[in-house]
Image: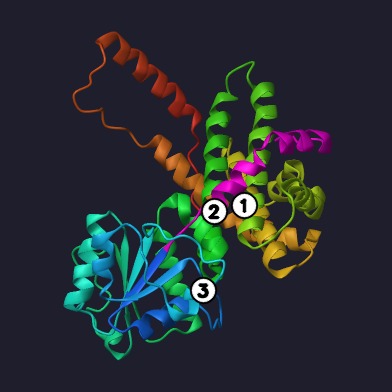
Amino acid sequence: MRSLPLRSIWQIVSEINLAEIQREIDAPVHLLIAADEEADAEQAARSLSSPGADFVHPWITVTDSSGSGLLSQSTEIAKRSPATRSSASQPSRSTPNCALLVSAQPDLSADLLSLQQALNAQSIPSIVVVVGTEAKRPDSAIVRRGEHARVAIADWSDGAVARVANTLIQTIPASLRLPFARRLPPLRPPALHMLIQETSQVNASYSFTTGLGETVPGLNFVLGAGDAIVLTKNQLMMAYKIALVSGKSGSPQQLLGEIVGVLGGGFLFRQLARQMSGLIPVWGIVPKVAVSYAGTWAIGRAVLVWATEGRKITPELMTGHYREALEHGRQAAQRIVDNARRPRSPSKGKKLPASKQATASRLLRRVGKRIPRLPPRKG
């Protein structure tokens, strides 16, 4: 894998639309939390606002189960908890992006059921959170009809909040995961883990595709240089998003410049390849896929540690992340190769002419020969 000189990296930085990324992460969000008793909803809201918080975040609306009437009357949610009514910076209320229905019983009350139906009518995903002693019942965590997800917790301890946050991140629209996580710190770990994982998968899939293309004479140099540009750009965008969601501030150019400076030589893909190459047997293009995934994953983890804990990124720290990421990279390579080798069923109602079918079959056989079979793992 080719590396890029620092001048080329800054050229890539100048081509990234940092302002657009920031606008996406600053997008308004609205979480509705309802319970039969408003005090129970407020407790949930405080737990999700910030660790140990004694306030309700302005972007969270707290209501009792009578909130169904508010939803049916207007797309505006006017009811607010006492903790947020007096806030001078209170954001304007729009239709909720997601809702938590907090219940002390596995079976929702009539009012909460009515609210859930109103939410479904507006295509607003809802998560039921069963809290208390009844959460121990075997059926308390079983998703009912009309629910998008359900969590059963004994209380609002840190571990329980983490479970609710993880479910919330998986339920809300993908485009709003990072905006929610930026405002609500308990949602940051699952959202950023998902971001790192998805970016690593994208880079690995791209490397696999170009790896097949590099076997064609004449394309090796072009694709080798292009790989470094695309992978580095994806890694920079991921790192910038991690910093923003983690609460880092400053102008976009200053912040991304700080990220590049903090990562230093460890950011260059050549260093990643060198670190990983000694740990991966040679299997054709598979090392390239594994390095792309593991290298991106390691960079994401390193930036996350810097952004959230303020730790300096040292060669020792990066090496630890490389080794930790290796198994993730190998598993990703295995999945991608297996998927590529799996035969696809023809699309219903669409048949190619016989001549094109023959050509496609020959092409698939040629490509299949270039996809390596991974050797069985020892132990």
Instruction: Note whether 16 is above or below 163 in the view shown.
Output: above
Please check the rendered image and state whether residue 11 is part of the magenta-colored stretch, yes or no.
Answer: yes
Ranked by sequence position, the earlier of labels 1 and 2 is 2
Question: Could you say where residue 188 lies in the image, as x and y percent from the top left?
Answer: 55, 65
Q: Is residue 130 left or right of residue 322?
A: left
Disc 3 element:
helix
Name the residue rendered at 45%, 46% in the picture.
335
Residue located beneath label 1 in the image: 241
Task: Magenta stretch: give its range.
Answer: 1-30
Instruction: Assess whether mark 2 and mark 1 are in contact (beta carbons under 8 angstroms).
Output: yes
Question: Could you say where residue 91 lies in the image, as x and y percent from the top left?
Answer: 50, 62
Q: Amino acid at mark 1?
A: Lys
Disc 2 element:
helix
In the picture, the disc for residue 49 is 3
Residue located beneath label 2 in the image: 195
Instruction: Note whether 337 is above or below 44 in the view shown.
Output: above
Q: Magenta: predominant secondary structure element?
A: helix
Q: Amino acid at mark 2?
A: Leu
Disc number lying in front (2 or 3): 3
Ranked by sequence position, the earlier of labels 2 and 3 is 3
Looking at the rendering, in which quadrant would you find the N terminus?
Answer: top right
Question: Could you say where residue 131 lies in the image, as x and y percent from the top left?
Answer: 33, 83
Q: What colour-coding does the image apply?
A: rainbow
